[in-house]
Image (spheres, rainbow, N blue to C red):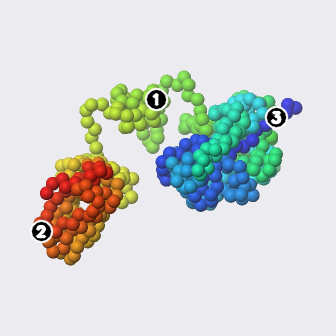
Amino acid sequence: MKLPRTAKVFGDMMTVVGTTKGGTVSVGQTMFGATSKATAWMLNDQISADKIYFKYQPGYGNAGIGTTGFVDGETVWFGPGAQASSGIGSIQVSAAASSTTGQKGTILEVDQTSGTLLIGDAIGFTTTTYGADDRFYIINTITNVAVAATYYKWQAGNGASQQVVYNNRATLTISPEKQRGIWDTRNLGSGQGSDIQIRTLFSQARLTGHDFLAVGTGNKTETGYPNVNLANVIQGQETNVFGPGKVFFVSTDQGGNFRVGDFFSVDQLTGRATLDASAFNLSGLTELRLGAIGGQVGEAINEFSSDESLAGNSNTACPTEFAVRGFLTRAKMGTKAMTPPVGTTAQRPGGVDEEFNTGCLRFNSTIGALEYYNGSLWIQPGVQEYSTVSSSFSAASGLVYFVNTGGGQVTATLPASPDLGATITFYDVGKTFDSNALVVSRNGRPIQGDNANLTVNTEGAAFSLCYSGSTYGWRIFSI
């Protein structure tokens, strides 16, 4: 018998809350658990499916494998500074129990492959702990092949000072979907690890045009033949597979249903086809129509377009992610106009509405003007925002304050880090500055070129301050 080639499971997997992603999160970055203090490298970004594949740095791992592992619900930081919980990106681990697991699903990260991997190879796992799995799987795709993959350990004060090299890396997609997670256990000591055996040659049985009828329901006594109860027919009992062996078949069953192996079937009564695979190749296909979904006959798609301007305005072309992002963010909308959502004041989104976010823009038909949500209220572009105050407050750039000092002196603290040209306006709304002054606290920036606060005690005063830069600071812009 030909000896199998070998490899090792490379890394583990965690379930994350994709909507909590912030900043830059990318493959190869250092990961640091804010609660657990575990460190790792990111291997595979599947955040769109709420998954991340990662490799613990030496010495770390979950219970029994390393000193410490990521914990459910914690924040994970990414990139330089991650170990100080101040990296360039972050994401939240799901709070559900056991959100950090061994690898499972249709993606498998491996290293230390002893030979060339081939699509169609059968793989099995020899580990007996931390996710033992006696099933065998078929390789569908092979990507990210690297003779040597280098990862860097970021450390406070000296950056990427250490590098770790792993040999013969690859990313596989497999079928069927792996249900049991297998941990990378190499940190247990020398020679440890979740070992994989890979075979190109394995036992096969081929059944072409076979009619299963009620095969798998039992013997004559168990089925009551010829009065077989077809409700007892279980397709999974039609064939038995042991080890890496496979049974390939093209068949019909007792209902006349056509099947090609475990992944493709056609119900000949209704014409409904089922394709159960992690990936499929549509090369040569010139048109795709998804009909009868919810009783509707959809459009026929004959092109996946990368045109960022969407110039074709076609009902038969589907834009790619690149095209959609380019249209929205790379000035590809053309020279005419874009129509935002239109509605009355009463129809503004709010609460848990998914369209209600800071920065959202709409046309308010009640007031006949554009408006946007700034995080606390709806305002119109170019229209100043007003606020009435009667106690000390922190002034914000761009606002007009009606200040009432009738109850005593009021202090307005200017922004600590204003932008050039930032403007703030103050009005003595109650004509009481002469009895109870307004004090403008400079907050570390000059006012009129002086490093002193501004006291205003003129009745009915109204003035604006404009920030001119760090040398002269805030200047009185108008009186």
Q: CA distance from mark 3 to mark 2?
A: 93 Å
Expressed as whole percent of the image width and height from the top left, the position of residue 346 reads 25, 57
For this orientation, the residue located farthest to the front is: 450
Quarter of the picture containing the C terminus is: bottom left
Q: State left or right for residue 467 relative to residue 434.
A: right
Q: Earlier along the polypeptide chain: callout 1 or callout 3?
A: 3
Q: Which residue is mark 2?
A: 459
Tell which of 334 and 55 is nearer to you: 55
Q: State left or right for residue 470 relative to residue 224.
A: left
Tell which of 476 and 294 is nearer to you: 476
Q: CA distance from mark 1 to mark 2?
A: 69 Å
Query: The residue under label 3 is which amino acid type?
Result: Pro
Query: The residue under label 2 is which amino acid type?
Result: Glu
Q: Is residue 405 above or below residue 134?
A: below
Q: CA distance from mark 1 to mark 3?
A: 41 Å
Q: Residues within 10 Å of mark 1 (few under 14, many from 20)?
A: few
Q: Earlier along the polypeptide chain: callout 3 or callout 2?
A: 3
For this orientation, the residue located farthest to the bottom is: 407
Query: The residue under label 1 is which amino acid type?
Result: Phe
Expressed as whole percent of the image width and height from the top left, the position of residue 65 reads 74, 55
Q: What numbered label is drawn on residue 4?
A: 3
Quadrant in the picture for residue 191 = top right
Residue 149 visible in rendering: yes
